[in-house]
Image (cartoon, helix red, strand yellow):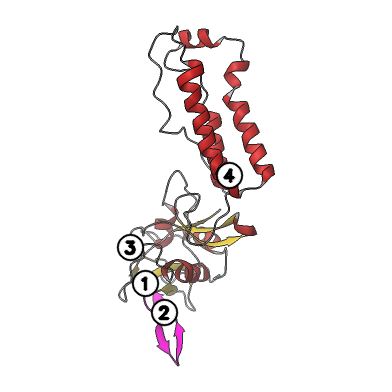
Amino acid sequence: MPKTSFRKNSDSPAPFTGSSEEPFYETIHWKMKISKIMSIFKQIKQYTLVTSIFAFSIGMLLSFSVLASNTSLENQVKKNKSDIAFNYTGIDFIAKYIKLIKRYDPGDTGPAGGFVFYVTNSGFHGLEAAPNDQNMSKWGCAGIDSTKKAGLYTGKENTKTILKQTCGGNTAAKVASNYELNGFRDWYLPSKYELELMFAYLYRGGTGNFLASLDHYYWSSSEGDSNSAAWSHCFCDYLDKDDKDIPIVIQSPKVRVNYVRAVRSF
């Protein structure tokens, strides 16, 4: 599972600035803390009992860590009034942990804030696409052999291979790998098949904020039959051929400017 950077919750209560003699510990702030704990655990109804117990135990241990210290609560406040002696790290950890072990379905908002378009392991793992397009770009590396892998979970390897090439310029793979959302930096250019899954489960489901255009397709990280072309996908209506719906997937010249939509695995 990709590493996640944990950051302090921006909606934490403002620092206490009143007198240390005010009996606020057992009233306002404990109520706020307990309320936050309960609001988080209301989301755990779809998780396993073992996971719930684990998250609760870790969170409570971290939340009450201050009480186990040798310094009394009153002395802690006197030492630094900006710290009200409630360790919100435990609460933040629970929220992040729950987000990472949640079960997902295609179309859901993923752990990083993108759109889930493929799931495995009962929905605990899968792939999510960025919620919006990145900059339009050429595929790059024209005339340079890259990678023709087109299957599931090959987009990440393809992207790494392309980035190792001395192609220069702002290639589609570089645009995708430079994308960042909510602290997640492990994005890559999807493979041909991963792009087809995005079309089937997001675009056809009316989700994903894709731009339908016959002039500009979406790049995959899969090279075409020659080293001067790569597979691209039009996120637009199907073409009717022989009474069958066939998505528009073509090999585009690498010098063509197309849309870039980054994806990541979780």
Residue 94 on the magenta span: no
Distance CA(mark 1)–CA(mark 2): 9 Å
Badge 4 vs badge 1, beta-carbon distance below 8 Å: no
Q: Position of residue 191 (x, y in %)?
A: 50, 67
Say what amino acid the circle numbered 2 marks. Ile
Residue at (62%, 10%) from the top-left corner? Answer: 70
Q: Is residue 211 above or below residue 7?
A: below
Query: What is the crowding at mark 3: few (fewer than 14 residues within 10 Å), some, or many (at least 20)?
Result: many
Residue 79 visible here: yes
Query: Does label 4 or label 1 sit earlier along the sequence?
Result: 4
Q: Nearer the viewer, mark 2 or mark 3?
A: 2
Residue 251 on the magenta span: yes
Query: Does label 1 or label 2 sit earlier along the sequence?
Result: 1
Q: Quadrant of residue 121?
A: bottom right
Q: Which mark is residue 44?
A: 4
Query: Does label 2 or label 3 sit earlier along the sequence?
Result: 3
SS label for mark 3: loop
Badge 2 vs badge 3, beta-carbon distance below 8 Å: no
Q: Is residue 150 above or below residue 248?
A: above
Q: Which mark is residue 217?
A: 1
Distance CA(mark 4)–CA(mark 1): 40 Å
